[in-house]
Image (tube, helix red, strand yellow):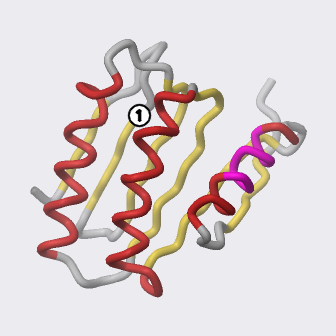
Amino acid sequence: MSRLFIPGTNSTAQVDFDRDAGTMSITGVSIPENADQFFKPLHEWADTLIKSYSGNIKLTLCLTYFNTTTVRHLLPFMQRLIQHFRNSLAVVWQYEEDDEELLERGEELSDVLQFKFEYEALPVED
């Protein structure tokens, strides 16, 4: 499985994982009704990636809003990536430049994971 694309909805983020490009992105709102069902293909894709890929990975997270259930899935997902790719992994946390709360949530996740994120402030969209 070289690519996983899941279009975003009003309650689920867009997922675009491309092994050939070494990129993974999760973008938008993440408040899925059935988080286990939504995140299952992401976990499975990551498991396959870990077994079959040894290059650099860039994970970009641009979540405008997410709930605790999303965090419960993101943490083990990211922990597996960090454990396997440690020095070959870059995690980029994107946030709107005036959204201090979202920046702080990224910093908290970085602290919990004990892995340094890169932070990218995006212009506020009108």
Secondary structure that dominates the magenta span: helix
Q: Residue 103: say if magenta.
A: yes
Residue shown at the point (62%, 59%) measured from the top left: 112
Residue shown at the point (68%, 67%) measured from the top left: 118
| Residue at image mark 1 | 14
Q: Is residue 81 left or right of residue 102?
A: left
Residue shown at the point (13%, 73%) measured from the top left: 51
Residue shown at the point (25%, 58%) measured from the top left: 46
Toward the viewer: 94 or 67? 67
Q: Quadrant of residue 56?
A: bottom left
Q: Could you say whether the residue bearing mark 1 is in a helix, strand or loop?
A: strand
- Residue 45 locus on image (x, y percent): 19, 53
Q: Quadrant of residue 83?
A: bottom left
Query: What residue range appears in magenta?
Result: 102-108
Q: Amino acid at mark 1?
A: Gln
Q: Is residue 29 left or right of residue 84?
A: right
Q: Is residue 39 above or below residue 88?
A: above
Toward the viewer: 80 or 52? 80
Quadrant location of the N terminus in the rendered image:
bottom left
